[in-house]
Amino acid sequence: MPTITELRVNGNKVPLNTDAERSLLEVLREDLDLTGTKYGCGAGDCSACTVLVDGTPTRSCITSVGSVASKEITTIEALAKNGTLHPVQEAFLKENAFQCGYCIPGMIMGLVGLLDKKPVPTDAEILSRMDRHLCRCCGYPSIVKAIRRAAAQARS
Amino acid sequence: METNPINCPAEILEDEQIIEPVAFEFGLNRRVFVQMIGAGVLITASAKPALAQRSGRGSGGARPRNVSARIHIGKDGIVKVMTGKVEVGQGSRAELTQGAAEELRVLPSQIQLVMSDTGLVPDDGNTAGSRSTPATLPAIRQAAAAARSLLVAFAAQQWGVEQDTVQVRDGRVTHAATQRTLAYADLAQSDELAKLFNQPAPAEAPITPLQDWKVLGTSVPRPNGRDLVTGTHRFSSDIKRPDLLRGKILRAPSFGAKLVSIDLAPARAMKEVVVVQDGQFVGVAAPSTARAEEALDAIAKTAKWESAPHPSSQEVFAYLRDGVQGGLPKNPFADELSSANKVLRQTYHAAYVQHAPMETRSAVAEWRDGHLTVWTGTQNPFGYLGELTRTFRLPPERVRVIVPDTGGGFGGKHTGEAAVEAARLAQAANRPVSLKWTREEEFTWACFRPAALIEAEAALDVKGAIASWHFVNVNSGQSAINTPYRAGKARSESASPRAPLRHGSYRALASTANNFARECFMDELAAAAGADPLEFRLAHLENGRLRDVLEAAAKRFNWRERIKQKRPDMGVGLACGTEKGSYVAACAEIAFDRTQNKINVRHVCEVFECGAIINPDNLRAQVEGCIIMGLGPALREVSRFEGGKILNASFRGYQVPRFSDLPELDIHLLNRPDLPSVGGGETPIIAIAPAIGNAFFAATGIRLRSLPMVPPAAKA
């Protein structure tokens, strides 16, 4: 079985020794204790497990850890810098855009990935990105407000 | 009622919550039991008094009498408030914090709300039935008010002044005349005060009247919101313990299947894998989930099963109808129907649906020195405690259930199977075990909102008034079963046949089905009477609060104008209802897309009233969430099954609402400061489905009487 010996996570080189077929989600959560990234479905249907891989929002539950061995992985834990929230986190907090909050790290990572590439996204681009993310509390209206706030801030 | 063939009979509590735990029969139980009988001590007898004190059913034990059971003021001035309620997204962490802050005259940020750790908090009952607002919030306010009065009395005594000359503000007790002041932190240094807190609370400490509210009634944000946006909040499956193993449970290939034989050797041969078989229970634990899956796969291949017959979702309504002993109740007013002006009889259906919270069932279990600690996501911490004590035959003081703020419940997390499974694995492994159900397990083995078959029959007199009303719910229960509308004669009843799937409560329970059927039937009666749906309802409504929300929604929506506008494949509909002491009305506009055979909900106006509003922003979020969540079972959600298997156990096969389903929302919260506050996380869901159904009729002339409502062309 192929193994993987190192991952680049949140700016650090992390030594590992594990099966390269395991999901990135499982390795982040179980081996590295980066539990901000959530399991929602294990099949790429809900995007709760979204992280950035070389800046691109990626569903870590259907990504093998071996396939991202040489790439830069960013998780929700790395967004706030020295206690200062990332503007997207700030927007979610300001709008109270969470109910149970389980889907929120994935939502935030998806939006960060979009705004990094497209600071002025169209409504269609926002919907196409965010429609992959499920919130079962159906707190979508507040999340939409947070998205608008974050997008407005990214523009300015 | 016949016993459900695959599970224990459901326990239906007074408020209609359905709690149907899985019956675990561990050999361990029988062994321990026999040992204890042999020794002359019957463990069940000795455990009973303790269980009676801490009911272990989550029904809410005796209210704590000492202030210290609820309130602890630290020497650092931080006030800890204890509650057995759980935060599952409904916002009770903010609301209960507000209640304590208001009565203690401190900022919400000075309160640390300790929730749902059975080792620390009083049993406030199951977090269900919208009871946190009407029951727990007053209990917390009362305790906080009692704590305040103790602080005042204590300070007054120290200063030798009258209590009514002492003011409390911002966490300080002040005597203005002598310019003396003490912070709570100062007072908390005294052992005397600690003693006072440990005595029964002074009765009738006055709680703050509404006109003096400073914190209640305002939109206090979630106290731990920052932890949610940074991902630092640890849900139960995020809990890390030393030497933690990951568990996996062998699931039957179909409902009711019995394990005949299995060869555990392939997994036992694997390094660092623990394998457990205990009766029908088979599970493994390993250092990683991948390893545990591998081990489970290796033995699952060898398992032989005996399957049991099981109806399919296609035939479920006939199955339920046939399952009613003695047949469906007959209309007691049947004799009078022949003399009625018009008689209408219709059948409505609601499918089995899943709650599908984002966080699947999970638990971390750890045994230490004969004590069991479980971290798990549940609405029912003391109920779980009871399940664990019964299953493992432990006295309650040896079990501790800790519920971190949980990733959604919606009425579906009242039972503790994941905790029991993790505990059994941890017991065998002698190491802590984390167990997280997969989405497929959640869609299959979690409890379902019961399907409903509803028959309604009514007669209209010559004036178009309802002369008689008969309403029968088969299988889903009695919530909101009684009609709020005036009828010459009315009877509503329910029947509980044997059920093919495991039942659980749902957001607003059976009222989702009962209100759907009634509000659609009212529309049909209005049409039969030649009346406008709004006017027909108002003509039969005496309840002022329900009339108020209905009239307010109609006005905001401009109903009287919009119902007259005829546009192809577009229509408006309305519905209202009451449940758990709150009132809701919704108007909806839909457009029927014939090319895709899809109902697009374009605009929803909903008015909701639940007494005095505690936290406007949070209440609005709950109403929004209810409406959008309600779109799912209204239009798409159905658990399909055949041969004992769920056919769509994934978010791909079971389509819940997404961003793209969002209609334009106009929500109005009708504040009634003159009325007691009741919960608002459930009832706002009950009006949306019938409003859509009625709007579809207005658009097409076709009645859709089955949830989810699929237009006829797509049914093939």
Image (cartoon, grey):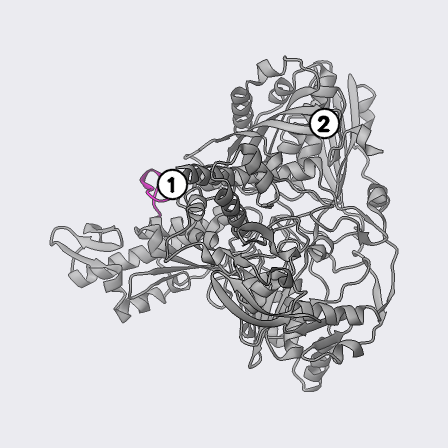
Residue beneath label 1, please?
B218
In this picture, is B410 found above or below B184?
above
Please state the horizontal and vertical placement of residue B707, each as a whole percent of the image: 73, 36
Segment colored magenta? B205-218
Chain letter for mark 1:
B
Q: Position of residue B328 (x, y in %)?
A: 82, 40
Whether the magenta-drawn stretch holds residue B566 is answered as no
The correct choice, above or below, for B532 with respect to B297 in the image is above
Q: Amino acid at mark 1?
A: Thr
Q: Quadrant of residue B80?
A: bottom left
Q: Depth check: give the residue in front, B501 or B9.
A: B501
Magenta: main secondary structure equals loop
Residue sticking out furthest to the front:
A70
Which residue is nearer to you in this view: B609 or B332? B609
Assess whether residue B214 is covered by the magenta stretch: yes
Q: Is residue B69 left or right of residue B314?
A: left
Label 2: element kind: helix
* Type of amino acid at the residue the image marks with label 2: Phe
User: For the residues carrying marks 2 and 1, which lies nearer the camera in this image?
Assistant: 1
| Side (left or right) of A40 relative to B402 | right
